[in-house]
Amino acid sequence: MSAAGTAPPPRGAGLRARLRPLWILLVYVLPWWLLVPTLTVLLYQSRLQNDLTRLAVAQSEYADARSAILTDALVRLTNDIRLIERVTRSAHQYLPEPDARDRLARFFVNLLDAHPYYAQARLLDPACHERVRIENGPDNRPFRVLDADLQDKSRRAYCTRTLALPDGHVYLSPLDANIEHGQVVLPLEPVLRIATRVTHVDGTPLGAVVLNFDAAPLLDAFTDPERPDAALVNADGYWLHAPDPADAFGFVTRQPDKRLGVRYPALWAHIRNSPRSTGQVQLDSGLWAFRRLAPADAAPGLHAPVWYVLSQIPADTLAAVRREQLVAHVGIAGTALLVLTGLSLALATSRLRQQRTGEALARSNHELAQSLARLEQSQDELVRSAKLASLGLMVAGVAHELNTPLGAAMLASGSLQEQLSALEKAFAEGLRRSDMTRFTQAHAAGLALLRDNL
């Protein structure tokens, strides 16, 4: 019996064998290339959000601090003007007009000497003519302006509006430039004017007291080398303090384009339409924080303009933060992927080597099993051949053992036939006693031989 042949490989087995290394490589490498980028994106977003939140909080705190500076100044102004109103009324209650003015002038001098951020202190009569005026000199020493140099302020809104207010109300002017004798003082002197009506004890009008607050130090507080983006804007959108000093006080220099609404219309629209007085908004120009200061809302009886404190984180700064985080996380992810890919390749190579070794061992085992099967088959054939040979020998032996007696029997049979023929011949010629005797003896011997062999 012939040995069985090796079965042909199934269709596609060769392609699967060629693709197996790629599949093992994907199993080890692909999870890292999915996991690491996913984790990197999540970590990048988290870290970026933390950085942006930190910037936003710092920006909000900065805007709050600048708003507090302005609020504190307004509170101080309001308290001081009310004090001046009471001193003025008291002086005119107990002293004649000239003496009351002299006492009020001395009080103004002491006030400006103690508070150098006041540029002027004045008493105006009901027709808005100055009656007492104290100014801070170039050497920061207050002095009284001569009566001949006192001015008519009837055309100035802060006087007419103050005199139109009820008793106890305070008028705070917009923050603008100082004007003397109808001309803007150059270089620009930013000033706030706070005023209130003064009446005699009997209620007859005495005039108004006015404090000019030097706003330059207040605006300087918005200047920070580390945050050059802070700004103060009035209700019309004009910069009072701007990152670019050339943009400030555009309403004084007759430059209507120097307004927030012209430079950043989307921001100005958001601020004006926002129902909240504080907030932050992300625009193409950057991240903006705004604070709406409306002193009149917090202090009954105070008539004051509205200001907006702004702080900007430019889009370039935000882009730099994103870029910095992106570079850092891409670097970390690239390094991690490089290391993990190397380890995965090593593991995949080891796994492929083990698989190939296993396949080689399997093929060897298969070949050994086939050889063993062929050997067992050969052994079976040898056993069958040996059996057949033994059977042949046995048959030959049996045939030999049968042929000898059968041959003798056949010989005896033939001899008996010849003897019978000889007897018949002798009977025909004349049978003799001797012939019968020989026939009988030979016939008996032949029968005996035949019987023994059979």
Image (spheres, helix red, strand yellow):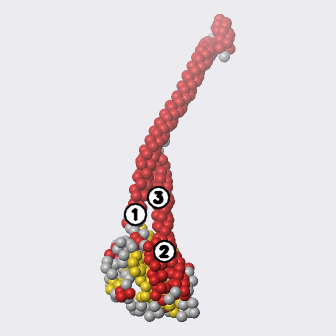
Residue 339 found in image quarter = top left
Q: Position of residue 261 (x, y in %)?
A: 40, 81
- Mark 3 is surrounded, within 10 Å at the Cα level, by few (under 14), some (14 to 19) or many (20 or more) other residues, namely some
Q: Are marks 3 and 1 in contact (CB under 8 Å)?
A: no
| Image quarter of residue 139 | bottom left
Residue 98 against residue 386 in the figure, above or below: below
Q: Quadrant of residue 451?
A: top right
The image shows residue 190 at horizontal and vertical percentages of: 38, 78
Q: Nearer the viewer, residue 127 or 355?
A: 127
In the image, what residue type sits under mark 1?
Glu
At numbered mark 3, what does the secondary structure look like: helix, strand or loop?
Answer: helix
- The kind of residue on which mark 2 rests is Ala
Q: Which residue is mark 1?
A: 226
Q: Label 2, on which residue?
A: 73
**Residue 273 in the image: above or below residue 33:** below
Residue depicted at x 44% and y 52%: 333
> Would you place residue 189 above or below residue 355 in this image?
below
Q: Which sits earlier in the primary sequence, circle 2 or circle 3?
A: 3
Q: Secondary structure at mark 2?
A: helix
Task: Kindly check if marks 1 and 2 are in contact, taking CB atoms under 8 A apart as contact.
Answer: no
Foreground of the two, 97 or 429? 97
Give the residue drawn at x 46%, y 79%. 106
**Which residue is drawn at the image coordinates 59% and 17% (left, top)?**
397
Image location of residue 69, percent across then percent down = 48, 71
Numbered disc 1: secondary structure: loop
Task: Tell me how many marks there are.
Answer: 3
Above/below status of 1 relative to 275: above
Q: Which residue does the numbered mark 3 point to in the structure image?
A: 44
Residue name at image x 50 percent, y 73 percent: 72
Quarter of the picture containing the C terminus is top right
